[in-house]
Amino acid sequence: MFANAFGHFDPTGRTFRIEDPRTPMPWVNVICNGRYGLVVSQNGGGFSWLDNSQLNVLTRWEMDLVRDDRGKFLYVSDLNSGHVWSLSPAPCRTPFDVYRCEHTLGATTFTTEHAGIRATWTLTVAAEDPVEIWIVALTDLTGRARRLRIGSFFEWCCGVAPDAKREFHRLFFTTRHDAARRAIIVTKNMWDVPARNEKEHWNRPWPYAAAHAVAGVRFERDLAIADKALFLGRYTDPAVPAAMMGEAPACAGFGRFGDAAAALGGDLTLGPGQTVRLHYLLTCAPDEAQAAALLDRYTDAAGAAEAVRGAGRAWDDRLSATRVKTDRDDFDLLNNHWLPYQAISGRLWGRTGYYQQSGAYGYRDQLQDSQIWLPLDPAQCRRQILLHAAHQFADGSVYHWWHPLTETGLRTACSDDYLWLPYVLVNYLKETDDLAVLNEVVPFVDDAGGATLLEHCRRAFARAAARMSPRGLPLIGSCDWNDGLSALGVEGRGESVWLAFFLAGLLADFARVLETSGAGAAAETFLARRERLVEAVDAHAWDGEWFRCATRDDGRWIGTRENTEG
Amino acid sequence: MFANAFGHFDPTGRTFRIEDPRTPMPWVNVICNGRYGLVVSQNGGGFSWLDNSQLNVLTRWEMDLVRDDRGKFLYVSDLNSGHVWSLSPAPCRTPFDVYRCEHTLGATTFTTEHAGIRATWTLTVAAEDPVEIWIVALTDLTGRARRLRIGSFFEWCCGVAPDAKREFHRLFFTTRHDAARRAIIVTKNMWDVPARNEKEHWNRPWPYAAAHAVAGVRFERDLAIADKALFLGRYTDPAVPAAMMGEAPACAGFGRFGDAAAALGGDLTLGPGQTVRLHYLLTCAPDEAQAAALLDRYTDAAGAAEAVRGAGRAWDDRLSATRVKTDRDDFDLLNNHWLPYQAISGRLWGRTGYYQQSGAYGYRDQLQDSQIWLPLDPAQCRRQILLHAAHQFADGSVYHWWHPLTETGLRTACSDDYLWLPYVLVNYLKETDDLAVLNEVVPFVDDAGGATLLEHCRRAFARAAARMSPRGLPLIGSCDWNDGLSALGVEGRGESVWLAFFLAGLLADFARVLETSGAGAAAETFLARRERLVEAVDAHAWDGEWFRCATRDDGRWIGTRENTEG
């Protein structure tokens, strides 16, 4: 279903299978469990993070949608022939005999055949822990014994992405080899995040430890390298890493002042037709002991495999509360699986795509998106409403966006941001009748005492009322919902007709909320405001003509202009 | 001279010649004429800028000293064999038969032989204009006619580097083909620089136009491509660009919403043993007309060649005012050429290296560095002193660093920044006796009326006097000159013994300035302050023991501790 030149959905609708990696843009899976996340493209490009996909990125990546050759990779080399390839198209651009990339709910799997080796590589995030798990299987297809080396490779970022002052940041990493756990542990004595206030110095330690480990197999010789130049070689082709050939250093590059990276693996012999299974882990925790404890939880092969299944089950459970069934299978397929999955994993939790690595909460964005929960788990939408209410200022204004972890943000100059709080609240109430939420007391950014959610919404409306033009239309401020009109009305003159429409609908809806919650007088005021607004729109924002739309016989839309009498 | 495994200085001392590109780190030339600059490594990696090497970068680069494979490149392909190589080691990692990279004053030249073609590629910046010039010559060494294609390639940045929100920024470029000038013109409707104040919106146009042109040769078929994916191909190896082989599009990828890049060149036939010469230009100006006028000035081959010679002459003239002659040739060589050249071109003008792409003026850094002018052209040091004085606040504090172009900066919390103004002034006066400079009236950042330079210095000393510990030692603040001690004394308790030493010397020196300029009473006060400071150092910062240093017979230093009586 939805087949195109590059791939198609499988019949269950849970999985999009890409069979030709030359997609017009990177086609990615954003896999997040609410805290830990990763993005991976059909090429294998991408990155990982904890809690904020811009401010706390674990692995280096470069936003380059033409090359898409930066990420976390698995290399394999044939120690007899010296040939090196990768288990995804990047970075080796291997001409696979068989290639398949399956983006499914909570996991991506690469299946490849090359040089007589069938490989599968599944990437997932544990449902309940900040742990990324890769399950790998290599099978000989030649019927001959094979001497292989496998090596993971990525560069540590451990903080804000992109790593702008990279050579400076490089100085603050410490890498350590945990031989017992077959792990590389990294800490960083610098976290260059925006300061919350003048007293906060930019120079503070990264308050985490990250770890990468390999498990599930005994190598004839282990490879553990924590320095980029030692693994890749200097000025060489990353498709042919120095350490994947010849006598690679077994354990090298740890300590300080290298170029912090992680490469783990080793040499093994694969009997004729034999399969070897192993897995990798990547995690991040407040300190080394907690990171080590997380590794220990998934070091067992059966446990790791179960975690992959658990991640898929968690998504099925999450999305199964409401199922859509119409006479169009394709509509059902998207609405039952991929669309809500993307909205939750990518937009609400990851807050990143492959082109907008944000990590921040947009005041409009995540409030709007949280409505995906209404048919699934309305308590999650309620949680989001209260979180956003806590990012309103006492004067009714809000952050256009703010960053979790640092709680820094950009106070909005847009006309509409703050109105999405009552908008989404109204929709939540329509679904749930949970009027008790109106009495939840929530702080303001600049007033820890806060007020009820109802009062938060009234302040939003009061702010809108204070931002009207002499003609009675809302001022647009720097922009309205169309923020392509950026910086349009910063001098306080331009009007927004869109916002007038939005506000007119919202005033009516919220009048009902007020009425239902016993504030009948206030409801009257809201309705009167709405009347005046509608009159202003009719007077100043409409030329008196209708535009009538109809479908022609051939199915195309046509429009005709008519005057009010017509 | 100074020969090592990778290269050596030539006998004139003006040129460092690298003969093996596998240097332990990129070895670069920072070529700047005071406004326009470029950095180029022995691999060919690097970038270009105008006026600010961080905020107004013309071409994309990635700070990756292990790979060093991002920059502005020249590709050549043999249209008969389909073989593609580059005229520097990056990005093709060509196994050259002959390789030489000569970093000289104001220019870098690559000389290579590969696939039967001898190539020279010289990069320079015009002495008087914001124009980067590449002179290229290709010679057949096989004695057979050759069908070649040559193509330049780089990605536009046009603003702040690194281009953090790259896929967003991508939307704001417009590229245009100026066929008459054989040029690619680029403008950008976004410049994401720090705002100076709350009213300044982050969304403003990049106030420049940039242009890349090819000249000096007629191609059989022109190649002009303004889109990265069209030139390189998607997900392909940048060592083998799609457009360097087969029937490349002649003119493609212009307009909006591509991935703005520049590739210019074309196809030519080289007779047996024949040489073809051509040149490329890169420039940036306030608008398209001015950019075009700059191209026109250098489109003539003789003019371009003369510009290369002129750039070298300008450096020789600049550095020839004082020549060092000692009994050590190596000492003379460095002090007559490379050290002052680096200090001026890299530190004062470019304000970038290959690892600290700054563009900002450091309050200490560029003041200290400006002393390089004292034996060469003291008026330049005077200019720097006055520029820095204008970045002092009325309370005597200064910016730790500030950005030209935006005039935004970080107000210092260090103990010492502001004291470098009198320090360098004293050294300037020692060389010049130019006491008139003391009466120059210079604004403060927060007081346009300003004050004399003498008063600026007195406010610096007054600020130092106000920041003393109860024991009479200077407070260290966030750090002193050792800013590795970053954030050490932000709570206003720690002391800096280093600053006590520095201030003691400075008070004495400045007392002489005051005395000479007729402020005898103030001079007395300064000397009295110095006395108290020296007493405090003796009392609290010295354990009463000497540390005596001597040279042993084998030439190594030894130290012995002695008490004051010893």
Image (cartoon, coloured by chain):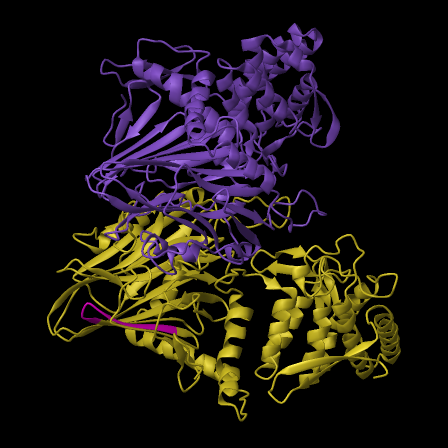
Chain colours: A yellow, B purple
Q: Residue at x 39, y 11 (%)?
A: B324
Q: Does the magenta stretch include residue A115?
A: yes
Locate residue A185: give its quadrant.
Answer: bottom left
Rendered-image quadrant of the C terminus of chain A: bottom right
On the image, the x and y values in percent for residue B128 come to: 52, 26
On the image, the x and y values in percent for residue B497 come to: 52, 25
Taking depth in this image into account, of A336 and B185 the one nearest to the observer is B185
* Residue farthest along the left direction in this orientation: A144
Q: Does the magenta stretch include residue B261?
A: no
Q: Residue A479 vs residue B531: left or right?
A: right
Rendered-image quadrant of the N terminus of chain A: bottom left
Taking depth in this image into account, of A319 and B84 the one nearest to the observer is B84
| Span highlighted in magenta in the image | A108-117
Visible residue check, residue A441? no
Where B244 sits versus A363, above or below? above
Locate residue A86: give its quadrant.
Answer: bottom left
Magenta span: predominant SS is strand
